Amino acid sequence: MPYDPRLVAPMREEMVRMGARELKTVAEVDEVLGDQKGTTLVFVNSVCGCAAGNARPALAVALNHAVRPQQIVTVFAGQDVDATARARQYFSDYQPSSPSIALFRDGEVVHFIHRHQIEGQSPQTVATNLTSAFDKFCGATV
Amino acid sequence: MTGHVFHPGHHALHGVTVLLETKGRVVYVGRFDTEDESGIHLVDVAVHEPEGSGPTREEFVRRTLKFGVRVDRKHTLVPSAEVASINPLSDVTS
């Protein structure tokens, strides 16, 4: 059962503040992920206070990097259930976990961060993982 | 691990995805929940039990690191006497 929307509102707002577009419906997910060109980061948000509480600040740090994906989008696991399930179909080789982060280039998953790579890590460590991927896959010439 | 308690007030590994090696041939990957007198409780658990044609332990770990935990069981209790080692999956290299 989804949490009270008022409880998760700050977690949504944190994503929007850093420039992520929320995808709340299957149609919105398909619109963004269905025919991709360029680079897109999908952040699977979570209510887990510890893992997601590290992952969101990590993404915020990473998005200050000089090189970054062209699009940043987010779905909320356990909240926007249908949208999250649809998004996961686009990276179905990877087992579902939340929070998690998928980086696409031209529709292909080129980097994935699982929950287990976030647990117990500092935001800076996770951010470094992300910015390394941004440098590798989101630069002008790839 | 960075050394801080992931979920304050709980076991240091609570909520952390771990690789649990038993003294036998079975390997588990799952989120550490609790430890009590009956053993270690894991949730959302992938189980590797070596069989003739199945993946090796190394292949199981390598695939789990890359693609995540393929959940076979929602909960598993591993008796303490059977536990050989427990390590955060993030510390494991295949």
Image (cartoon, coloured by chain):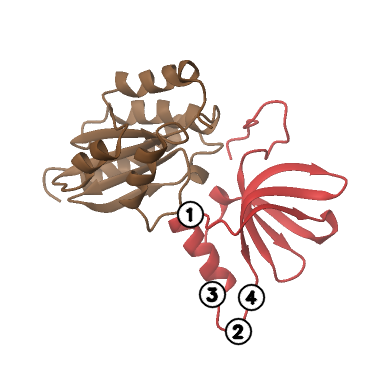
Q: Amino acid at mark 2?
A: Gly
**Do marks 1 and 4 both belong to one polypeptide chain?**
yes
Which sits earlier in the primary sequence, circle 3 or circle 4?
4
**Residue A110 screen position, x and y as percent:** 28, 52
Q: Is residue B4 above or below residue A139?
A: above
How far apart are the two marked residues, 1 and 2, measured between alpha carbons?
23 Å
Q: Label 4 crowding class (10 Å Cα cut-off): few <14, some 14-19, many 20+?
A: some
Helix, strand or loop at disc 4?
Answer: loop
Q: Are marks 2 and 3 in contact (CB under 8 Å)?
A: no
**What residue did someone put label 4 on?**
B50
Q: Chain of mark 1?
A: B
How far apart are the two marked residues, 2 and 3, measured between alpha carbons?
8 Å
**What residue did someone put label 1 on?**
B68
The chain painted brown is: A
- Residue found at x 34% / y 26%: A60
Residue occupying the far right of the picture: B37
- Residue found at x 67% / y 45%: B32
Q: Amino acid at mark 3?
A: Pro
Q: Amino acid at mark 1?
A: Gly
